[in-house]
Image: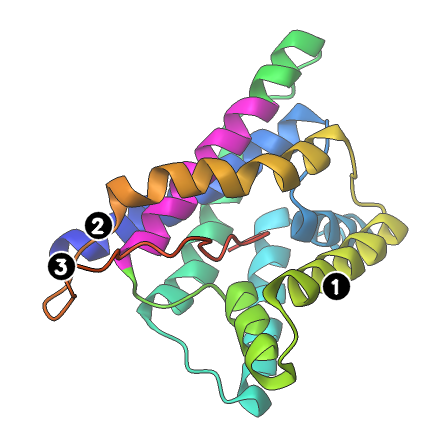
Amino acid sequence: MPRRLVQLGLGLALYGVSMGLLVRSQLGVMPWDVLHQGIARRLDLSLGLVTGIVGLLVLLAWIPLRERPGIGTVANVIVISVAVDATLAVLPAVDALAGRIGLGVAGIVLNALATAAYIGVRLGPGPRDGLMTALVRRTRFSVRVIRTSIEVLVVLVGVVLGGTLGVATVLYALAIGPITQLLVPYLVIHLPGDDPAASSVPETPPIPATA
């Protein structure tokens, strides 16, 4: 458990850092962050605060769906919110296109690493992941249909509110799954009772838009 908690904390902190890198790239943010950014601009609030508030609201939607949070779920709301605001506070804006591209690429790769780290500890999904899996279970639609529907909706609302939809958003959507899938086997933690003959890594891990 100590290793799981440390890896969870580091993974979620790095997730917040990756969000900040993408914001500073000015080339687009993660799908859910388009919504967060739009709300933050409309209400003049920090991105981290809005991320946390939306996370709590999504958790409320778990109640009728009978989804149960874990330690990782609660930590997700708190740690990521603090980490993204801290990153934006110390990381200045970059004007050069080459620098912005570097920030965007680094943000996507770091996000995949962070996602693999917190998936690997198996201490509960993030609020948005839990909503997706609960809806899949309740509606019997595929993960692809539910996830795509949710992300298209939040992106559209976010764009209307003033969120940034750009090339990095598209690149994130295309690259995050394969990169995370590559990294998960190195970060998954085996627990007592696991079947050593079975793979502990799902073929398609749940990749959060924002954890």
Residue hosting label 3: 196
Mark 3 closeness class: few <14, some 14–19, many ≥20 residues within 10 Å = few
Q: Amino acid at mark 2?
A: Val
**How far across and down, in percent of the image, does residue 175 sit?**
57, 35
Q: Going by the image, does 81 lie left or right of 53?
A: left
How far separated are the C-alphas under marks 1 and 2? 33 Å
Residue hosting label 2: 6
The magenta region covers 104-121
Q: Amino acid at mark 3?
A: Pro
Residue at 57% in and 16% down: 102
Q: Earlier in the sequence, mark 2 or mark 3?
A: 2
**How far across and down, in percent of the image, does residue 208 sit?**
54, 54
Mark 1 closeness class: few <14, some 14–19, many ≥20 residues within 10 Å = few
How far separated are the C-alphas under marks 2 and 3? 24 Å
Q: Going by the image, does 153 lie left or right of 148?
A: right
Determine the secondary structure under disc 3: loop
Residue hosting label 1: 149
Q: Can the viewer see residue 48?
A: yes
